[in-house]
């Protein structure tokens, strides 16, 4: 047990090392001279040289890398040159919005994906199975930003069922205290029902669209796990004993695929954080995805790389957690 | 039976024979039976039709459309789709249909170039790691796993923005984030063949390592890698469109589909066609590759899906 956990943590450390090497290299191959970005292009040569030294650019690369990593470890991601705030502060400020969106999205994915996958497995080769295959294929093929626009056009502009872009209507902004940063929770704490429902009507469309990405994946995996269970003898035994089909499927078979299913869900949560970059841009959602897009537009490398590290770290950690979870819950994997 | 039909029948039998007389006949026969299996799958055939359609549009489309993707008629801004402008016009009065047609070349070029970079790199890393094993294998696979463990889109975004936004840099960024699965696949295939008798025989005849890898191992890795590549092309199209949408790809006025969707975002509520029609092109192409890839996988590896063909 301990050895396995150590190995996982070792591989996590190695991945973090690789991630920082990549971001370090990217911050060095920049076509923009990092010194010029600080001193401006009219600075005299001696100022340029002094700043060049101050920034440590005359040191050997491995020393520069070490310096870079120690800074990161101290939470110093540099200062964003378009918000003029430390990047870490910016990210911390925007992170809850992304987590809120991705969490609602994954809930939608689970709520629809798991039953669809089960149904497709039970009715293998018949129409529910085909419908699921097509729904999945469309999900895999859809550019998520385009789906966002189509959704906005239909459900916001034409039908008026949901609220438009943004997290909340502008006249509700900054009313509730940001206790947790999650609008849905903060508004409940403040007891502002109107704000809560307004936030719901803002989040439901982007979350459904983001959730569709995970739905396709979750349904496909549920189906294949279920197929593995349904041909087992214990299912036959349960049927012979006279249990109702619903009980056999939802209790016995589904209970046995819970472990791999949880790892699949953890993995797709990682995908969603990434997919949020595009969705947030479409819906003017003030999370880290939108922040990344803004910093890309301003060529703000500190902010871009900081966001990359944050999303990368989340993604890698989720992978590790799902591995660990599998290992802890399922004794057979030991 | 007419002569033509008879000829066709004998050709069919020659192709499907259980005892091929030569290498060419065996290869063609294999190809033909795979094709027959693929043809039974209507979804895969639809995918093939879309992919062939994309090739045709990219090849001859621009000369048929006539209009220019750059020609602006500022008095005809944001016209809805009509018989004159099939997909309407954009904010600068350019014909969106012409732009989508020209854009197919960019998409196709991008897919082709990414494949040309990714395929050899993945093959090289995978076969070398699998063939030699040992420390080299561990090192190469560590690097592969590192890239597999990181989020693709975000990494590609960071790379593209560090290199500066342009279509070449998008290709580089996507290629850097796309090769690892092929290396893994090639390594797995290599491991199953490297101890086989014919590789041993070649070794004893004095063949060099490079010769064995190139002539005896690479050909066996290719089929599964090509199937995987077809499946991945949808993903490549989507990532490229995403990068274009975020402004990292081809720069204006280039008719790149993702960038066109991004232009249309300001007009989405009133002039839906500016953003949605180029986006539909992205969707159709990526759906086509997904359908075709799914079908190919069913043919080459029926175990993988469990779906009946």
Image (cartoon, coloured by chain):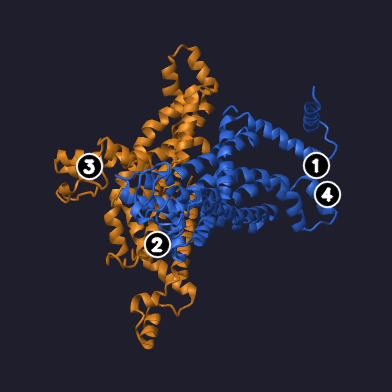
Pointer 3 and pointer 1 on the same chain? no
Q: Earlier in the sequence, mark 3 or mark 2?
A: 3
Colour in which the image shows chain A: orange
Residue ID for mark 1? B24
**Circle 3/circle 1 CB separation < 8 Å:** no
- Residue A252 x/y as whole percent: 45, 23
Chain under disc 3: A
Measured Cα–Cα span from mark 1 to mark 2: 53 Å
The residue depicted at 47 percent of the width and 35 percent of the height is A136
Tell which tag, 2 or 4, sits nearer the viewer: 2
Picture quarter containing residue A33? bottom left
* Disc on the earlier residue, 1 or 4: 1
Question: On the image, numbered disc 2 is attached to which residue?
Answer: A305
Viewer-closest of B227 and A176: B227
Q: Is residue A104 visible?
A: no
Q: Against A304, is A119 above or below? A: above
**Could you classify mark 4 by the number of other residues whose Cα lies within 10 Å: few (under 14), some (14-19), or many (20 or more)?**
few
Residue drawn at x 63%, y 28% as measured from the top left: B40
Mark 4 — residue?
Answer: B201
* Residue named by callout 3: A199
Q: Nearer the viewer, mark 1 or mark 4?
A: 1
Q: CA distance from mark 3 to mark 2?
A: 30 Å
- The image position of residue A190, as x and y in percent, is 14, 44
For the point 72% across and 46% down, the residue is: B193
Q: CA distance from mark 1 to mark 4?
A: 23 Å
Residue A269: give x, y in percent of width and height. 40, 43
Please state the chain letter of the residue tagged with numbered disc 4 in the rendered image. Answer: B
Please, what secondary structure does the residue beneath circle 4 have? Answer: helix
Q: How busy is the neighbourhood of tag 2: few (under 14 within 10 Å), some, or many (20 plus)?
A: many
Q: A249 or A36: which is nearer to us?
A: A36
Chain under disc 2:
A
């Amino acid at each position: 047990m301990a050895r396995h956990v150590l190995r996982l943590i070792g591989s996590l450390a190695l991945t973090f090392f690789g991630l920082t090497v990549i971001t370090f290299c990217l911050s060095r191959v920049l076509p923009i001279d990092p010194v010029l970005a600080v001193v401006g292009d009219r600075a005299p040569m001696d100022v340029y040289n002094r700043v060049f030294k101050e920034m440590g650019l005359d040191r050997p690369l491995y020393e520069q890398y070490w310096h870079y990593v120690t800074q990161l470890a101290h939470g110093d991601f540099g200062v964003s040159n378009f918000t003029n705030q430390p990047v870490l502060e910016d990210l911390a400020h925007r992170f809850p919005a992304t987590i809120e969106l991705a969490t609602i999205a994954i809930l939608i994915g689970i709520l629809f994906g798991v039953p669809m996958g089960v149904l497709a497995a039970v009715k293998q080769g018949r129409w529910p199975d085909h419908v699921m295959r097509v729904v999945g294929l469309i999900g895999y093929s859809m550019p998520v930003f385009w789906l966002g626009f189509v959704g906005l056009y239909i459900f916001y502009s034409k039908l008026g069922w949901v609220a438009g872009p943004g997290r909340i209507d502008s006249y509700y902004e900054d009313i509730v205290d940001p206790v947790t940063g999650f609008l849905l929770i903060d508004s409940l704490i403040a007891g502002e029902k109107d704000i809560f429902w307004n936030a719901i009507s803002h989040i439901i469309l982007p979350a459904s669209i983001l959730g569709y990405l995970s739905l396709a994946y979750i349904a496909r995996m549920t189906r294949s796990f279920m197929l593995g269970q349904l041909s087992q003898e214990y299912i036959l035994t349960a049927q012979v004993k006279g249990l109702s089909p619903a009980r056999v499927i939802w209790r016995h078979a589904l209970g046995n695929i819970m472990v791999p299913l949880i790892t699949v869900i953890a993995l797709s949560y990682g995908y969603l954080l990434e997919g949020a970059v595009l969705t947030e841009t479409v819906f003017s959602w003030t999370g880290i995805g939108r922040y990344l897009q803004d910093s890309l537009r301003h060529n703000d490398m500190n902010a871009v790389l900081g966001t990359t590290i944050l999303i990368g770290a989340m993604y890698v950690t989720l992978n590790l957690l799902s591995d660990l979870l599998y290992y802890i819950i399922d004794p057979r994997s030991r | 039976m007419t002569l033509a039909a008879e000829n066709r029948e004998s050709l069919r039998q020659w192709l499907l024979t259980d005892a091929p007389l030569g290498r060419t006949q065996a290869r063609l026969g294999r190809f033909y039976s795979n094709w027959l299996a693929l043809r039974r799958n209507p979804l895969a055939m639809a995918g093939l039709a879309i992919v062939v359609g994309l090739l045709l549009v990219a090849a001859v489309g621009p000369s048929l459309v006539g209009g220019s993707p750059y020609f602006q008629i500022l008095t005809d801004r944001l016209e809805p789709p009509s018989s004159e402008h099939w997909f309407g016009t954009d904010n600068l009065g350019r014909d969106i249909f012409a732009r989508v047609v020209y854009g197919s070349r960019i998409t196709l070029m991008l897919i082709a170039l990414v494949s040309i970079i990714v395929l050899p790199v993945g093959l090289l890393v995978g076969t070398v790691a699998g063939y030699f094993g040992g420390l080299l294998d561990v090192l190469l696979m560590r690097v592969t796993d590192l890239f597999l463990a990181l989020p693709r889109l975000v990494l590609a975004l960071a790379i593209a923005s560090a290199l500066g936004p342009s279509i070449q840099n998008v290709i580089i960024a996507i290629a850097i984030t796309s090769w690892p699965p092929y290396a893994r696949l090639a390594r797995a295939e290599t491991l199953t063949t490297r101890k086989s008798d014919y590789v041993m025989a070649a070794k004893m005849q004095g063949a060099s390592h490079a010769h064995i890898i190139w002539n005896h191992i690479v050909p066996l890795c290719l089929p599964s890698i090509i199937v995987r590549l077809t499946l991945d092309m949808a993903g490549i199209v989507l990532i490229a469109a995403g990068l274009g949408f975020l402004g990292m790809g081809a720069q204006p006025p280039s008719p790149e589909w993702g960038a066109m969707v991004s232009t249309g975002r300001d007009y989405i509520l009133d002039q839906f066609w500016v953003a949605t029609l180029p986006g539909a092109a992205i969707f159709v192409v990526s759906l086509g590759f997904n359908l075709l890839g799914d079908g190919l996988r069913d043919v080459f590896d029926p175990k993988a899906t469990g779906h009946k063909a």
